[in-house]
Amino acid sequence: MNVAWTQAAEGLPRRAFSVEDVRRMIDAGVIGEDENFELIEGEFVMMASKGIAHERIKSALILAVARALPDDLRLGVETTLRLTDLTMLEPDLAIFPRSVFERDISGFASLQSGDARLIIEGAVSSLTYDRGLKAQIYARHRVQEFWVIDANERITWVHTQPAGDTWGSVVERGPSDPLTTPALPGFAIRLAEID
């Protein structure tokens, strides 16, 4: 189902939608479950379709992460994550404790602050959004590690040490640099090697 979206004029009040509002709209058929959007502090943000470069990297990461995943963690692939009553995001990959799926608040996986071990966002057209606003939101919710991957250039920005709305460390990794994470002992991948 296609829904028309509009932007309000700056300075005018806007209605802030809640995660529960979104759940009711999905249940009523106003929003289709396959529509690509995120809810950021009560506002809908439409997400672009993903191209082949993005899908190629995401597919390789899914396989590599799944092979290295410890039993106490789960891998969410494009799982809708409820962070607050007004914010829900859908990262490409998220690694979190298995207990997250047991918390059913409004039908979405509910992350508590500090739950997420690693969140990965692949991007082409949304690099500024992912490295800016989304990075701030993930830092605020104490995601332990956040990767933004430029799918075309295969460059990764590895964010660690969340503090408030910022990160204590952001390291740029090139396509041939190995990507590793404390969340997955033994995991390593080089984006340059993905065909």
Image (cartoon, grey):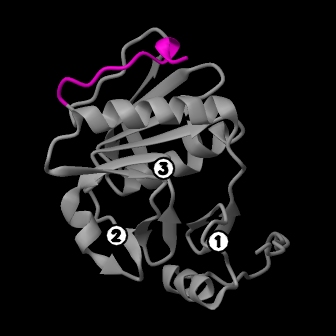
Q: Pick the quarter of the image with the C terminus.
A: top right
**Numbered label attached to residue 73:** none
How many C-alpha atoms fall within 10 Å of the one at disc 2: few (<14), some, or many (≥20)? many
How many C-alpha atoms fall within 10 Å of the one at disc 1: few (<14), some, or many (≥20)? some
- Residue 174 visible in the current orientation: no
Q: Nearer the viewer, residue 41 or 187?
A: 187
Per the model, the C-alpha gap separating discs 3 and 2 is 18 Å
Residue wearing tag 2: 110
| Span colored in magenta | 185-195
Considering the numbered disc 2 on the image, is that residue within a helix, a strand or a loop? strand
Q: Nearer the viewer, residue 169 or 84?
A: 84
Amino acid, disc 3: Gln
Ranked by sequence position, the earlier of labels 3 and 2 is: 2
Considering the numbered disc 1 on the image, is that residue within a helix, a strand or a loop? strand
How many C-alpha atoms fall within 10 Å of the one at disc 3: few (<14), some, or many (≥20)? some
Amino acid, disc 2: Ser
Q: Residue at x 70, y 37 (%)?
A: 51
Residue wearing tag 3: 136
> x%, y% of residue 139?
39, 49
What secondary structure do most residues of the magenta stretch adopt?
loop
Q: Nearer the viewer, residue 137 or 194?
A: 194
Q: Residue at x 71, y 48 (%)?
A: 49
Q: Nearer the viewer, residue 22 or 172?
A: 22
**Numbered label attached to residue 43:** 1
Q: Residue at x 35, y 81 (%)?
A: 105
Membership of 114 in magenta stretch = no
Q: Nearer the viewer, mark 3 or mark 2?
A: 2
Q: Quadrant of residue 112?
A: bottom left
